[in-house]
Amino acid sequence: MKRHLSALFIMLTYSFSFAQISGTVVDKKTGNPLQYVNVWIKNTRKGSTTNNYGEFKIEFGKIGDTILISNLGYQEKELLANSINQIALEPKEIELEEVVIIPFKNINTEFIKSYPKKGKVTELYYNGYYSLARYYPYKATYSKYPFIKNISVVTSNALKSEVTFRIQLIKADENGKPTKTLMSEYKILKTKKGKNETFVDLIDERIQVPKNGFFVVVDRLNLDENKFSNKIAKNILQPAIGMESKNMEPNTWMYFGGRWIEPKELKNFVGTAKNIAVNVELTD
């Protein structure tokens, strides 16, 4: 009898330890729920994104795991996970670095192209909850075209309904690594079924190309409505993100769980080190 009770105790302990971690993320000052917040189990690819009501859930999490919560305009927060978590984030000012004011003409343009048209993008980064960031080092020729006018990315969506994803721009440091310095607010975007090219118009923001270069970050959002299942696989996160067709110099970084993975290590995590397909249009 004692053996049976011990086995039962171990099984119950295991099931309670490895369970669904869920909760709500709100603004500490207003109490309002926060949408599209990244919630990670630190240093892992397990995580979630808050929905319209600020709610999240992480399958197969463990009570006592360190949860990392980050969102634009709020202080990053870490805590030990309970089965249900009520998390309040402290607002902070977005620190956008000052730029030198120069004349804005918007007459001539220059393209930094990684793909000629969406039909030429045939390979994709798919599934997995992570962000991919394409690095653009500064070049002397950019002094003639100092403003970022437009960004376009290619995605593929297997669902019948539209899915939501996000793009942001961040500055690089003097070594070409990602910083926490934002160049613009998050761009929340939607893409319909099939392969699509999504454009982000930045002309009104007059964003200058930084001297250390910059990153275009593409975030998939780990929401229930963004998951596709078929006979082969379950809960494949949408959309897939297009790759360059050629093996160019690796400059795509990967982010998950509070850490950046460098291009030279990318293949160890996703099986390829090809750059994501992002086109940038500059103007004078």
Image: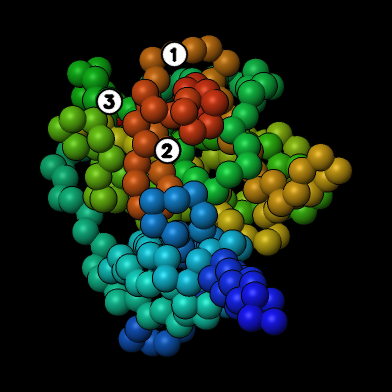
Considering depth in this image, is 154 or 130 the residue closer to the camera? 130
Amino acid, disc 1: Met
Give the Cα distance between marks 2 and 3.
Answer: 17 Å
Give the Cα distance between marks 1 and 2.
Answer: 17 Å
In the picture, the quarter occupied by the N terminus is bottom right
Q: Position of residue 84 (x, y in %)?
A: 52, 80
Amino acid, disc 3: Pro
Q: Which residue is mark 3?
A: 137
Which tag, 3 or 1, sits closer to the chain's start? 3
Residue 248, label in figure: 1
Q: Does the image show residue 24?
A: no
Considering depth in this image, is 161 or 238 the residue closer to the camera? 238
Which mark lies nearer to you, 2 or 3? 2
Residue 22 vertical position relative to residue 44 in the rendered view, above or below = below
Q: Residue at x 42, y 71 (%)?
A: 64
Quadrant of the image occupied by residue 112: top left
Q: Which residue is mark 2?
A: 254
Few, some or many residues within 10 Å of mark 1 (<14, 14–19, 20+): few
